[in-house]
Image (tube, helix red, strand yellow):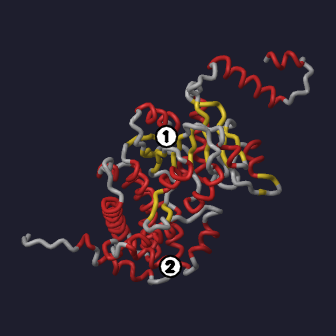
Amino acid sequence: TKVIKMLGAGSRLPALLQKSIIHKTFYYRTIGMSKMAKKICIVGSGNWGSAIARIVGANVKANPNLFHPDVKMWVMEEIIHGEKLTHIINTKHENVRYLPGKKIPDNVIAVPDIVDAAQDADYLIIVVPHQFISSSCLPLKGKLKPGVKGISLVKGFCLNPDGGIKLISKIVNELLDIPMSVLMGANIANEVASEMFCETTIGCSDSDEKSKMFLKKLFCTPNFRVTVVDDTTTVELCGALKNIVACGAGFVDGLQLGDNTKAAVIRLGLMEMIRFTEIFFSNKNSSMSTFLESCGIADLITTCYGGRNRRVSEAFVKTNKPLIELEKEMLGGQKLQGPETAAEVNFMLKQKDMEDKFPLFTSVHQICTGKKLVLQFIDDLRNHPEHMIHADVHL
């Protein structure tokens, strides 16, 4: 207000800028801009990234003692009806491309350059399609300030050139040398954006309880309930593997085989998720109870009934169109995760000569790559290892 008075009542400062000066002056004077106030950057602005921006922007405003008032969001620049998408977001406060009809808080600032968006951040929220994780993070290497932490909302894997697969959080950790947490759950983006009640799971292995409370403050709302667990690896694995099972559920819907069959696919898929985690990624924090969190069984059910992988897989059966064509037709620029994750998992299973131990994962991959007919999917499940328990008792 002093600045505005000094310039005089007749100042030509735009009303929006005057309002911004008053808002920032109030913030700094009343809060003192605590050294503890953290700057948040959202890396990604698709459907899920924009839905999370609604939550994060509001929570940052509500907790000025913890967070810097502005949230920068990296946006891959696009031209929409002759206007830059960043300009639309910053003036209309809406991502008309990926989350139309839902307002984004005005303290979320769209930035087209990823380094400009992230270089002064204290916390990175990574939410880009898993296919682009390396290309998105590489420009940030050596450009971040010391002490940065990150949390991945990315569901998927990447192939390890030396064999096997790598978790997204591990890739980010290695590329940027920052500690990583993960957030996964039964969180269909449009429903989260519509503020329908749901739960999510954060995997945070940081021994400092303050870090876990910080994450709850950043993400938790009355309609987006957060549970924090130590088992980061299982949380992340669930978020990726369930997309393979969702493809199987979509095949069942396309074949019109009914809810009993879909329930069997969900159960067998869960068992393969558990087995895969136990064999390849078990560690001291691993816990079976994690599969009962939102990231586990809840996300699996939601994805098998309402997710994009299920929808596109159903259409794949009914139309006989290639998956890549259906992705363009049905997803409005979003990426299909299940088939690529199935390929990454199959790469590892083939290396270990264990394809027969995971018939659902294997069959989904073979169907998606045209090596097997979708009609053979149920045949592959009839002889599932889960059905091969031999007992010497008679009922």
Q: Is residue 388 left or right of residue 243?
A: left
Give residue 149's position: percent from left, percent from top. Answer: 53, 41
Q: How many residues crowd around disc 1 within 10 Å: few (fewer than 14), some, or many (20 or more)?
A: some
Q: Is residue 250 above or below residue 62?
A: below
Give residue 167's position: percent from left, percent from top. Answer: 46, 57
Report the residue at 39% width, 78% height from top. Answer: 377
Q: Which of 154 and 101 is in front in this view?
A: 154
Q: How many residues crowd around disc 2 within 10 Å: few (fewer than 14), some, or many (20 or more)?
A: some
Q: What residue would you read off at disc 2? A: 369
Mark 1 in CB contact with mark 2 (< 8 angstroms)? no
Q: Is residue 10 left or right of residue 259?
A: right
Give residue 275's position: percent from left, percent from top. Answer: 31, 63
Q: Which of 161 and 111 is in front in this view?
A: 161
- Amino acid on which the number 2 mark rests in the picture: Thr
Sequence-earlier tag: 1 or 2 = 1
- Secondary structure, mark 1, is loop
Q: Is residue 234 above or below residue 390?
A: above
Q: Quadrant of the C terminus?
A: bottom left
Report the residue at 47% width, 74% height from top. Answer: 254
Q: Is residue 46 above or below residue 379?
A: above
Give residue 371's position: percent from left, percent from top. Answer: 46, 83
Which of labels 1 and 2 is toward the front? 2
Circle on res. 81:
none
Give the distance between the C-alpha atoms of the residues marked 1 and 2, in whole angstroms. 39 Å
Report the residue at 79% width, 18% height from top. Answer: 1
- Secondary structure, mark 2, is loop
Q: What residue would you read off at disc 1? A: 223
- Amino acid on which the number 1 mark rests in the picture: Asn
Q: Quadrant of residue 91?
A: top right
